[in-house]
Image (cartoon, helix red, strand yellow):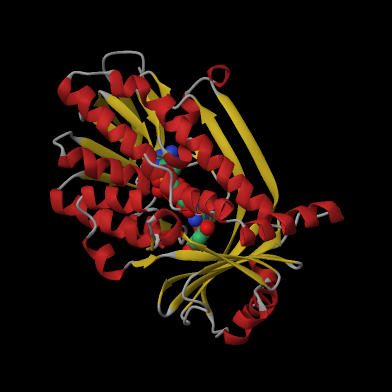
Amino acid sequence: MKTQVAIIGGGPSGLLLSQLLNKAGVETVVLERSTRAHVLSRIRAGILEWGTVELLNEAGVGARMAQEGIPHDGCYLTDDELMVHIDFKELTGKQVMVYGQTEVTTDLYNAQDAIGTTVIHGVEDVSIHDLDQATSYVEFTHEGARKRLECLYVAGCDGFHGVSRRTIPEEKRSEFERVYPFGWLGILSETPPVHDELIYSNSRHGFALASMRNENLVRYYVQVPLSDKVEDWSDQRFWDEFSRRIPSDAAARLITGPSIEKSIAPLRSFVAEPLRWGNMFLVGDAAHIVPPTGAKGLNLAASDVYYLYKALIDAVKGGSKTGIDEYSARALERIWKAMRFSWQMTTMLHRFDGEDAFAEQMRKATLTHLATSETARRDLAENYIGLPF
Ligand code: FAD
Ligand code: DHB
């Protein structure tokens, strides 16, 4: 088999890159380990920056999002009973969009079907070769047979546990990491949202987040110790804990119901450099992970795709290699700023085991500063709605 760009991973990064490249007449083959049903069942991000919305529109997959997505003008951050309103619209003129990652991925798969691109599911033992030659190749096992795919470029869109990043020799890679001593337990429940905007709650009992997918589907989270298992959390235990972590006015309005999904995600900050190794480029979670506080994971994947798809079109069609030469440095500059914001939001809103009274006072002071300073709120809003690509 032959293609122009081999894309490893059919999650949001791989599919969006494939969609944008094919629309511009650059041919791709996407190699995905899991089934399509499995990719679509993973409940993850829920908030899109406006730049991500515009990129999805540019990719021709914005129609259902325009109908079913919910634009949000702001969110709340709390310190026990204090609710600080961050009015994105007033402070920055911009909004964000509530539209789940599963919906984005569904729209991308449907669009790929419509233009007839090749997405191969169930591939195993992917290996990447000859990245320093004019033509590279990817080997993989599919339906019991070893296959070879020749290509000009490889896009490593295979998430944190993928093979692409590890194809770069260890001594040529720098990795920066912070592992947080807690995770997020998330549930989906077919109940109306407790508030019309998101609430990021800093409470004496730990962090909670009230998010949503639509007017009758909520996504709520609580901070939990890393040792906790999903089985430790009955629905009743979740609702009791969630309601004592959000301000009492909101708790009084909370409507509970059975959970239809429940999972725990550990929190981590991670960056690998460089993002380019010969003909291969790392994109999205393959190169970096942010803790979810601040909703940057999926949006960072989208900004990587934005830089790379233009660069690859120039390299494949226009004969200019400037874009691919600059990709790693350009993408990393924005990645590090989002790393900083996600780390700051995480530190500001979570209780750390064994922390002292001083740390708690610092969190409180940060939130009261936000409550009283428009400058501080504007800075937060500018980062939350997404720095320019
Ligand atoms: P992925 O979504 O990881 O996609 C990578 C794809 O590559 C997968 O489909 C995988 O099956 C495939 N793959 C892996 N290895 C191979 C291989 N060897 N060969 C072929 N294919 C392979 N972000 C937020 O903003 N908010 C959230 O609430 C949030 N919650 C999250 C919860 C969890 C449990 C996780 C893991 C992430 C969460 N994120 C969240 C982050 C966000 O979902 C990711 O940033 C986003 O999915 C990145 O997209 P991606 O396509 O780069 O990687
Ligand atoms: C959601 C997840 C986040 O990490 C976040 O910051 C906001 C919303 C969500 O799943 O809806």
User: Would residue 117 be visible to someone looking at this image?
Assistant: yes
Residue 138: x and y in percent read 33, 28
Q: Residue at x 69, y 73 (%)?
A: 81
Relative to residue 199, is residue 6 drawn left or right? left
Quarter containing the N terminus:
top left
Location of residue 186 in the rendering, given as x and y in whole percent from the top left corner: 57, 66
- Which image quarter: residue 42? bottom left
- Relative vertical location of residue 250 with respect to residue 128 in this rendering, above or below: below
Which residue is painted at 40% across and 28% down in the image? 330
User: Residue 287 placed where, x, y %?
Assistant: 48, 35
Q: Where on the picture, by quarter, is residue 92?
A: bottom left
Q: Residue at x 25, y 23 (%)?
A: 152
Left or right: 103 as drawn, with respect to 44: left
Whether residue 228 is situated above or below residue 50 in the rendered picture:
below
| Left or right placement of residue 358 versus residue 123 in this view | right
Q: Which residue is nearer to you in this view: 6 or 373?
A: 373
